[in-house]
């Protein structure tokens, strides 16, 4: 094998040090090893886990805060579904049995973001047949509150979450098959306003401190402290 660095050093009349030669050899050996790697991805045989009827959409996100991505599916089910299934990650690529939560009619798509600012990822589902999105707040430990629905355009097949107006709160966008529209739902929640009275004050701070570690996280505490004393829009 021709080692370029050595030849050029000799041509220049400078003998490389033994350290430099070792480095060049290492590079050459590693290069051969890299090129010898198989280029076709390999996967283990599938392991199946039961979810609700007629799953149409899947999302992966850490809903219980253990650092491992969990599974959430939207289950259309032709009338027998109308649920999301949550499968907590147990480590090593294995998952706990599903826990189902009711959503609107005809769920087609699921996405996750922290829409209420407590530091936990919440579930948002596009319901094709009820022209709504369902929002399920994360209560901690991978459990979710009952859904709250919001109207969108006709036939939402898909939902995506991002902060479209730059206020730090994730907003909802749906693609609506039947009326050729997208619906944009700006998130108006005041993240530090824990009790929902429109002001971020000592009441909110106290609620966070009392529930800290079980109900609330560092994110919720920070939301109160950063916006303390402000009136919600
Ligand atoms: Ca997890
Ligand atoms: Ca949340
Ligand atoms: Ca926003
Ligand atoms: Ca408040």
Image (cartoon, helix red, strand yellow):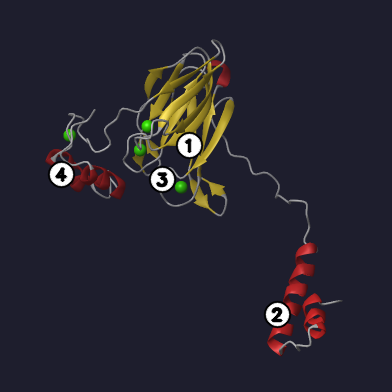
Q: Nearer the viewer, residue 115 or 91?
A: 115
**Which element carries disc 1, helix, strand or loop?**
strand
Q: Which residue is mark 4?
A: 206
- The yes-or-no answer for disc 3 within 8 Å of ligand 1 is yes
> Which of label 1 and label 2 is nearer to you?
2
Distance from label 4 to label 2 (Cα)? 60 Å
Q: Are marks 1 and 3 in contact (CB under 8 Å)?
A: no
Residue at the disc numbered 1: 86
Sequence-wise, the earlier of marks 2 and 3 is 2
Q: Residue at x 82, y 80 (%)?
A: 7
Distance in Å between CA atoms under marks 1 and 2: 51 Å
Q: Residue furthest left?
A: 202
> What is the C-alpha distance between the residues marked 1 and 4?
31 Å
Ligand 4 has an atom within 8 Å of the beta carbon of the residue at disc 4: no
Which residue position holds label 3?
64
- Relative to 89, is 167 on the left or the right? left
Q: Which mark is nearer the camera, 1 or 4?
A: 4
What separation in Å lies between label 3 and label 4 (alpha carbons)?
24 Å
Mark 1 vs mark 3: which is more N-terminal?
3
Q: Which residue is mark 2?
A: 23
Q: Residue 192 at x, y = what percent?
A: 24, 38
Most foreground residue, 153 or 77: 153
Residue 231, quarter of the rendered image? top left
Q: Position of residue 21 (x, y in %)?
A: 74, 84
Residue at image point 28% right, 36% down:
191
Mark 4 or mark 2: which comes first in sequence? 2
Q: Are marks 1 and 2 in contact (CB under 8 Å)?
A: no
Identify the image quadrant of the C terminus: top left
Whether residue 10 sits left or right of residue 185 in the image: it is: right
Q: Earlier in the sequence, mark 1 or mark 2?
A: 2
**The N terminus sits in image quarter:** bottom right
């Amino acid at each position: 094998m021709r080692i370029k660095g050595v030849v050029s050093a000799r041509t220049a009349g400078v003998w490389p040090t033994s350290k430099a030669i070792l480095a060049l050899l290492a590079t050459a050996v590693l290069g051969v090893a890299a090129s010898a790697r198989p280029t076709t991805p390999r996967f283990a045989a599938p392991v199946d886990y039961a979810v609700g009827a007629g799953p149409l959409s899947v999302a992966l996100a850490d809903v219980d805060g253990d650092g491992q991505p969990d599974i959430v599916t939207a289950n259309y089910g032709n009338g027998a579904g109308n649920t999301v299934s949550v499968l907590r990650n147990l480590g090593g690529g294995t998952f706990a049995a599903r826990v189902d939560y009711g959503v609107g009619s005809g769920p087609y798509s699921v996405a996750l973001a922290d829409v209420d600012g407590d530091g936990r990822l919440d579930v948002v589902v596009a319901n094709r047949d009820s022209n709504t999105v369902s929002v399920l707040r994360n209560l901690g430990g991978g459990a979710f509150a009952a859904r709250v629905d919001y109207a969108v355009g006709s036939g939402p097949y898909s939902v995506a979450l991002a902060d479209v107006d730059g206020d730090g709160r994730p907003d909802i966008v749906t693609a609506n098959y039947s009326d050729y529209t997208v619906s944009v739902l700006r998130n108006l929640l005041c993240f530090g306003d824990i009790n929902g009275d429109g002001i971020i004050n000592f009441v909110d701070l106290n609620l966070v401190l009392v529930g800290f570690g079980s109900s609330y996280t560092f994110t919720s505490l920070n939301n109160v402290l950063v916006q303390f004393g402000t009136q919600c829009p």
